[in-house]
Image (cartoon, rainbow, N blue to C red):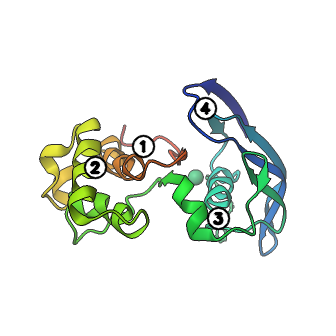
Amino acid sequence: MSTSPTATSTDALSVTLDDVHLAFGRNQVLRGVSLHVPAGTTTCVVGPSGSGKSTALRIVNRLLEPDSGDLLVDGRSVLADDVDEHRKRIGMVFQQFNLFPHRTVLDNVTLALRHLRGLSPDAAEHVALQRLDAVGLRHKASSRPAQALGRSAAARRHRPCARPRAARHAVRRGDVGARPRAW
Ligand SMILES: Nc1ncnc2c1ncn2[C@@H]1O[C@H](COP(=O)(O)OP(=O)(O)O)[C@@H](O)[C@H]1O
Ligand SMILES: [Mg+2]
């Protein structure tokens, strides 16, 4: 794995992995990974398939807990924090679809705003439409994800990008993965 930070904004939080280890059974995937992402920067984690990129990102969102080592946000360990509170600050764009297929695009975007941020239905819809506008998908608000996004991997990632944008996380992470063979 290699990383490369680039400054993008100043209104954000730093994220640090400190000597993180994680094994799935006998498969020791992360063996002492340390990574500091300064506030307001973008870092790309690059490496071969199976090297542990997604696993490391899941630890940042606390979808996985490390066997040892620490996760810090703005210099403070957050592994003992309430996990829902943690995820209000840390957004993740998943590599795969991860949308509710039976709900509209708009519903998918408003869910986090209503249930995590406690916005009223009207306020959540207002924010969600703004964010869909930002990614060029406002006209698809009433469609189901499968109708709205078509087949391309790029299009599939557009809509999930609106969800963390809408939730206004201080830290957003995208798990892009390998370029699909169809491209
Ligand atoms: N939930 C899991 N259970 C067991 N093994 C897993 C799990 N998630 C990932 N792995 C294994 O961990 C390794 C790293 O996977 P991953 O983090 O997805 O790699 P990358 O994102 O770099 O392609 C792989 O060997 C994968 O099979
Ligand atoms: Mg991956």
User: Residue 49's spot in the image, x, y percent?
Assistant: 62, 49
Taking the spot 43% from the left edge, 66% from the top edge, the residue there is 116
The residue beneath circle 1 is 181
User: Residue 77's spot in the image, x, y percent?
Assistant: 79, 57
Taking the spot 75% from the left edge, 69% from the top edge, the residue there is 80
Say above or below: 132 vs 78.
above
Image marks 3 and 1: residues in contact by CB distance under 8 Å: no
Q: CA distance from mark 3 to mark 2?
A: 26 Å
The residue beneath circle 4 is 40
Q: Nearer the viewer, mark 3 or mark 1?
A: 3
Earlier along the polypeptide chain: callout 1 or callout 4?
4
Q: Nearer the viewer, mark 3 or mark 2?
A: 2
Image marks 1 and 4: residues in contact by CB distance under 8 Å: no
Q: Name the one closer to the observer, 27 or 110.
A: 110
The residue beneath circle 3 is 62
Check disc 1 and report its element: helix, strand or loop.
loop
Mark 1: give few (<14), some (14-19) or many (20+) Cα within 10 Å.
few
Quadrant containing the N terminus in the rendered view: top right
Q: Nearer the viewer, mark 1 or mark 4?
A: 4
Amino acid at the residue labelled 3: Arg
Check disc 3 and report its element: helix, strand or loop.
loop
Q: CA distance from mark 4 to mark 2?
A: 23 Å
Mark 3: give few (<14), some (14-19) or many (20+) Cα within 10 Å.
some
Earlier along the polypeptide chain: callout 3 or callout 2?
3
Q: CA distance from mark 2 to mark 1?
A: 35 Å
The residue beneath circle 2 is 127
